[in-house]
Amino acid sequence: MNRSGALRNLLGAASLMLPVMVIAESNVQTGGATATPGATAHVDFSLVIPQILYLRVGTGSSYTTGVYTANTAVDEIVFSPTAAQVGNGTAIAGTGGDLTGGVETAAVVSNFGNVTLNATASGALIDGTGDSIPFTQITTAATTLTSATALPAPVLTNTTSANVVLTAPASKVIVQDAKWTYHYANTVAVPGGIYGGVNVNNSRVVYTATMP
């Protein structure tokens, strides 16, 4: 027998076996077998949900629409007490911020449990001539924005603040925001000068959110 004939015989034999093979996923029942449960078929489903951790302080992308994108803008908050106000203990409101008046939008969105939030400075604000103002002179007040509970603000220091822990509900999903209003406490008399600036003289504070 040549190879062509052998191949035809092999395919023919295989075709005779097909009715008794089980091929997933279809099922044919005939006669009395059509009664309950009858013919069945199965489908498996999987949903792959990414872990999300979104942090916004100041200018940033929207977080209420479920579309999270990066935004590299960095806001500057400026305090400018008058000569009569310097060191008199009356808090000074700032200018700037995405909500103006020294007020920033702050938001955390996550879907995988508790979130830890802190703030890190690289040292006291300096003027470049040896004078400094500690970050403890800059206070942050958190008030509600859209969430029922305002997102707490870390207390600024010259190094890394104490952690703020956001406890997730049973759903593990956190959506919490606030208006963070910054003030200069103005409780110490300091030499005249420009302390900080735009990413100079220890001006920049880095807020960091982490989750398990």
Image (tube, grey):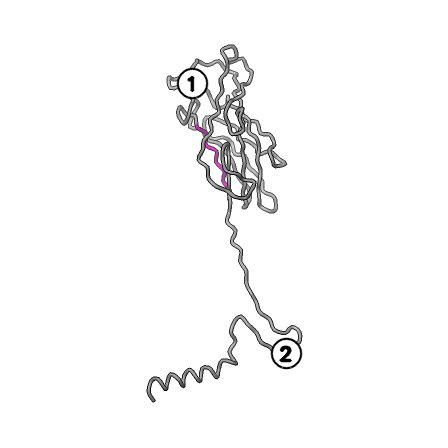
Q: Which residue is mark 1?
A: 194
Q: From the viewer's perspective, is residue 74 above or below residue 52?
A: above
SS label for mark 2 = helix
Q: Earlier in the sequence, mark 2 or mark 1?
A: 2
Q: Position of residue 157 (x, y in %)?
A: 48, 26
Q: Position of residue 67 (x, y in %)?
A: 52, 43
Magenta residue span: 204-210
Q: From the viewer's perspective, is residue 77 above or below residue 1?
A: above
Q: Position of residue 21 (x, y in %)?
A: 51, 78
Give the quarter of the image for residue 179: top right
Specify whether residue 70 is painted magenta.
Answer: no
* Residue toward you, 13 or 192: 13
- Say which amino acid is labelled 2: Ala
Q: Which residue is mark 2?
A: 33
Q: Position of residue 101 (x, y in %)?
A: 54, 24
* Residue toward you, 116 or 4: 4
- Quarter placement of the N terminus: bottom left
Main SS of the magenta part reads strand
Residue sitting farthest toward the top = 84
The residue that appears at 54% across and 13% down in the rendered structure is: 88
Task: Give the CA separation, mark 2 to mark 1.
Answer: 89 Å
SS label for mark 1 = loop
- Say which amino acid is labelled 1: Ile
